[in-house]
Amino acid sequence: MSGTALHARFLRGLRLDPGKTAVRVGPDAVTYEEVHERALSWAGSLLAGAEERPRAIGVLADKGIDAYVGLLAALYTGAAAVPLNPGFPAARTRHMLELAQVSAVIADGPGLARLADGGADDMAFPVLPTGGAQVPPGRRALELSAGHVLTEPRSVEEADTAYMLFTSGSTGRPKGVPITHGNTHHYFQLLDQRYDFHQGDVFSQTFDLNFDCAMFDLFNAWGAGATVQAVPPRAYRDIPAFVAEHGISVWFSTPSAISLIRRLSGLAPGSLPGLRWSLFAGEALTAADTVDWQTAAPGAVLENIYGPTELTVTITGHRWSPEESPARCVNGLVPIGAVNDGHDHMLIGEDGSVVEDEGELCVTGPQMVRGYLDPVDEGGRFHPHDGRIWYRTGDRVRRLDNGELIYLGRLDSQVQIQGWRVELAEVEHALRACESVTEAVAVTRPSDNGLELVVFYTGTPAPPAVLARELREVLPHGMLPREYRHLAELPLNSNRKTDRSKLAAACAVAGAAPARTGAV
């Protein structure tokens, strides 16, 4: 098997110590050897009777042991793993299954319930049930058999897709992003050089498995022979106690977690003494939050890492220095750092020309994906220049005096909501489909947990609970608006376009009273 395969990192951890705990979720824990043997068994059953290598294997399971094993089993088949969330709306799940062209799905009880709930009841793929779950009538179940167990994972090439993830799309449907083994191989080689992760480490796992940052946790930990510790929502009531109890030494989350832990009195000076590394990504990191976290975890090296899914998890990193970093912050935000080795980047201005100091960040190199699963979604995001293709991030950045970059804001209608990458146009599209809504505009406002969504709409006034119920049918929970405001008509600017800045200003203060009907 090629050493460039993503799952080769797990095999490296397996060789270091087969009896070491690979992952813990609540009271459940499994060793590297147990995960490996189970993944080989599941992969064999997924491949049994298949005439050719499957294109993609869905993993539709809650964040438990089965989901982690399922992800590895999908990789062992040589197919692309497609981690999915059973909590997502049925229509959204169906679209992702169709776009990925899955050959089979690994599903636990909640995953099977989602499939039975109209998510894909008429799609022909078989299902490998886990945890004793029963496959619904009419759906072919794959059975585990000792005769089907693989002796080793199937080989893959660098150009083969390792996993597929889905990001918010402006057309009202998620965009599929295929990440190859070559993409991940370059990425994790760089991380091996950058960090001193080792077998004694325990990695927090705060992200859902359909979020690209989860891959950072898993394959850094497994590549070092370390342990992955899932962090449940209830743990945030006392993160210092949870971190100490489970021996967590590497923390990775969105910056929103800092404000949440602070509100719950978890950031007292020295309250996180066991951390060696503190890593944050998914949204802008403020200097104030950084100082507070560093005070709580004085023995940890803290980094702000940045990157869109299309550039394989993260593409830049800034290591916080209490002596030097504060002077380089802009608008209270921490620099995102230098672009990863092996990549070229450029900044482009509003007229499309290359500029030196401030503009849209574009990157090309081995971590850039080839494009979206559906080319219709590309919309100029992959940009030809100087004989090469560059990914346009849509992020406006500034080059600092030391060559590092700092994030200044979005150029388009895409935002980060507690780590979720959200196209405002997708939220607006979903809201316009509600029975009482004619026009809709989504904006953001700051809150103690980072940005949150507020929507303005015209049409017939409707109770927020009714609108929220309709949106839950098509949008994941993380994309639901915090507040709904009805207007008689949307305000227009001097160009007769919807005045988004006026709407944003009207709700700039989190928790402010909603505007009166018909007024902004």
Image (spheres, rainbow, N blue to C red):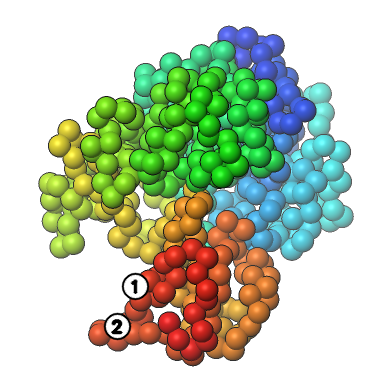
Q: Position of residue 272 (x, y in %)?
A: 54, 25
Mark 2 falls on what kind of element? loop
Q: Earlier in the sequence, mark 1 or mark 2?
A: 2
Mark 1 falls on what kind of element? helix
Q: Residue at x 59, y 10 (%)?
A: 15
Would residue 449 appear left or right of 127 to someone viewing this image? left
Viewport quadrant of the C terminus = bottom left
**Residue 344 sits in quarter:** top left
- The amino acid pointed to by label 2 is Asn
**Residue 49 sits in quarter:** top right
**Residue 400 sits in quarter:** top left
Q: Which residue is mark 2?
A: 493
Q: Is residue 276 above or below residue 490?
A: above
Q: Check contact, mark 1 vs mark 2: CB within 8 A.
A: yes
Q: Position of residue 20 (x, y in %)?
A: 66, 13
Residue 280 is marked as none
Count of numbered circles in the view:
2
Q: Residue furthest top?
A: 16
Q: Residue at x 70, y 51 (%)?
A: 86
- The amino acid pointed to by label 1 is Ser
Q: Which residue is mark 1?
A: 501
For the residue pair 507 and 395, the one nearer the viewer reads as: 507
How far is disc 1 from disc 2 in space, using C-alphas?
9 Å
Q: Residues within 10 Å of mark 1 (few under 14, many from 20)?
A: few
Q: Position of residue 318 (x, y in %)?
A: 32, 33
